[in-house]
Amino acid sequence: MAIFITIIYVVLMICTFMCLFRIAMGPTSADRIVAIDILGTVIVGFCCVVILQGGRNFYMNIAISWALLSFIGSIALAKYLEGKGLDE
């Protein structure tokens, strides 16, 4: 089980670096928005792996909160880049 968890950590770290690269070097702002959203999903994945490894259930609350904030942030950033207000 420990090698499986280690492999998952390595894959998530590779995904994190790929997202950070896309955020820094993305040709368009839409690419950067998608990379930020995927990075939020990867962080939720890290929380889920910690739950599997340690059995601490309060990380599930962190994962759900992070996913919700990531979603709302992506929508707000997309509306800003589109030139609309948040109330439209």
Image (tube, rainbow, N blue to C red):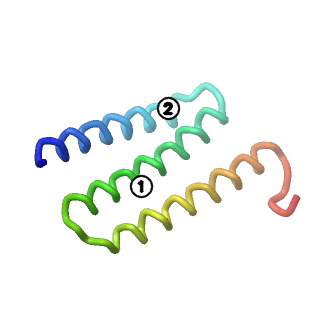
Location of mark 1 (residue): 44
Residue drawn at x 43%, y 63% is 63
Q: Check the image and name the residue furthest to the left.
A: 2
Coordinates of residue 81 in the picture (x, y in percent): 75, 44
* Residue 22 disc label: 2
Amino acid carrying label 2: it is: Arg
Residue situated furthest front in the rendering = 1
Mark 1 or mark 2, earlier in chain: 2
Asked if 31 appears above or below 74 in the picture, the reply is above
Query: What crowding class fits label 1: few (fewer than 14 Cα within 10 Å), some (14-19), or many (20 or more)?
Result: many
Residue visible at 53% across and 45% down in the picture? 36
Which tag is nearer the camera, tag 1 or tag 2? 1
Above or below, comparing residue 79 to residue 61 in the picture: above
Q: Secondary structure at mark 2?
A: helix
Is residue 31 found left or right of 17 in the rendered image? right
Residue furthest bottom in the image = 58
Q: Position of residue 12 (x, y in %)?
A: 32, 41
Q: For this view, does 11 lie left or right of residue 83?
A: left
